Image (cartoon, helix red, strand yellow):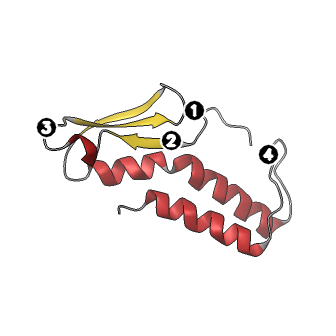
Amino acid sequence: MNTKHTPGAWEVTGSGMLGKGASEVTIRAVGFRLLVAKMPKNADAEANARLIAAAPDLLAACVVALEAETHISPEGWKVPYLDRNARVELLRAAIAKAEVR
């Protein structure tokens, strides 16, 4: 897949683990010290941060689902073929990452 965003996976940091004194929620690229996004901590911050952090997983799941439905890969996208059960699990995992726990 050809993209211009910071490669995933991304993770939420600074949410519930920092407690009431935390002033912001951040999203970082896993394995890097690269900051992807930062937002003030408020009632919606953790849910928004989880959705942002899930973006690379959601994009990858959509690409795989599109390839399966159309039986073609758009030029430049490297999409491995996955059977139906694997596609469903990929989609479920991406959705679960975006949902607030």
How many angstroms separate mark 4 from mark 2 (CA)?
Answer: 21 Å
Instruction: Say which residue appears at 19% left-offset and 52% top-offset.
Output: 43
Circles 1 and 2 in contact, beta carbons < 8 Å: yes
Badge number at residue 21: 3
How many angstroms separate mark 3 from mark 1 (CA)?
Answer: 29 Å
The three-letter code of the residue at mark 2 reads Trp
Residue behind mark 4: 77
| In this picture, residue 26 sits left or right of residue 57 | left
Label 3 element class = loop
Residue behind mark 1: 6
The three-letter code of the residue at mark 4 reads Trp
Label 4 element class = loop
- Please tell me whether mark 3 or mark 4 is closer to you in this view: 3
Residue behind mark 2: 10
The three-letter code of the residue at mark 1 reads Thr
- Please tell me whether mark 4 or mark 1 is closer to you in this view: 1
Instruction: Say which residue appears at 35% left-offset and 61% top-offset.
Output: 100
Q: Which comes sooner in the sequence, label 3 or label 4? A: 3
Q: How crowded is mark 3: few (under 14 residues within 10 Å), some or many (20 or more)?
A: few
How many angstroms separate mark 4 from mark 1 (CA)?
Answer: 17 Å
Instruction: Say which residue appears at 72% left-offset and 74% top-offset.
Output: 85
Quarter of the view holding residue 9: top right
Label 2 element class = strand
Image x and y of residue 37, in percent = 40, 34
How many angstroms separate mark 1 from mark 2 (CA)?
Answer: 9 Å
Circles 4 and 1 in contact, beta carbons < 8 Å: no
Quadrant location, the C terminus: bottom left
| In this picture, residue 92 sits left or right of residue 3 | left
Q: Which comes sooner in the sequence, label 4 or label 2? A: 2
Image x and y of residue 66, in percent = 73, 62
Image x and y of residue 45, in percent = 27, 47
